[in-house]
Image: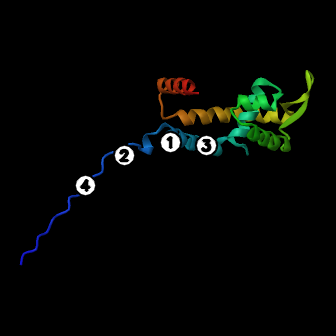
Amino acid sequence: MARSVTAKKSVKPGKPPYVLDEQVGFILRQVWQRHSSIFSRDIGTNLTPTQWAALSKLAETGPCSQNQLGRLTAMDVATIKGVIDRLTARGLTETSQDPEDGRRLLVSLTRAGQQLSEKVAPNALAITRETLAPLDPKEREMLMALLNKLR
């Protein structure tokens, strides 16, 4: 008695409708992880990217309210409060009453905060250069223009 053997055909699945590796959010997260790794390695001091953002923005703008600083650095209220609390505990920022509105506190750099921001700025610029190093100058310019357009 002969047995009938039916060969199963291997069916290759088609391309799924959603491929994670092709999604802008996933790619941006991978780029951010690479940048964060470079930042941690090269910043030269014990600062997080959010702490550096607050310090550098205060060095750029001068004293401002915590809410304004949060808006300028794209941090929500809870995040900027924690960042400023940690920077103040390290003696890098301080708060004072706003002379124009006694209900509002202004955040400013201390002398130590100003000195640290000046010392770290060259490292931060080098971190940006290394993050963008795989791109040629024209590609860097185009990437920055496109990212600014997506903001």
Front in this rendered view, residue 15 or 21: 15
Estimate the spatial distance between the alpha carbons at disc 2 and disc 3, rounded to whole Å: 31 Å
Circle 3 Cα neighbour tier, 10 Å, few/some/many (<14 / 14–19 / ≥20): some
Closer to the eye: label 2 or 1: 2
Disc number placed over residue 26 in the picture, else none: 1
> Is residue 126 or residue 16 the one in the foreground?
16
Mark 2 → mark 1, Cα distance in angstroms: 16 Å
CA distance for labels 4 and 2? 14 Å
Q: Amino acid at mark 1?
A: Phe
Name the residue type under label 3.
Answer: Ser
> Gap in Å between the C-alphas at discs 1 and 4?
29 Å
Which residue is disc 3 drawn over? 36
86 vs 7, nearest the viewer? 7
On the rendered image, what quadrant is the N terminus found in? bottom left
Q: Position of residue 100 (x, y in %)?
A: 91, 21
Numbered mark located on residue 16 in the image: 2
Position in image of residue 75 (x %, y %): 70, 36
Label 1 near label 3: C-beta < 8 Å? no
Q: Which residue is mark 4?
A: 11
Query: Circle 4 sits in a helix, a strand or a loop, which is it?
Result: loop
For the residues labelled 3 and 1, the Cα–Cα distance comes to 15 Å
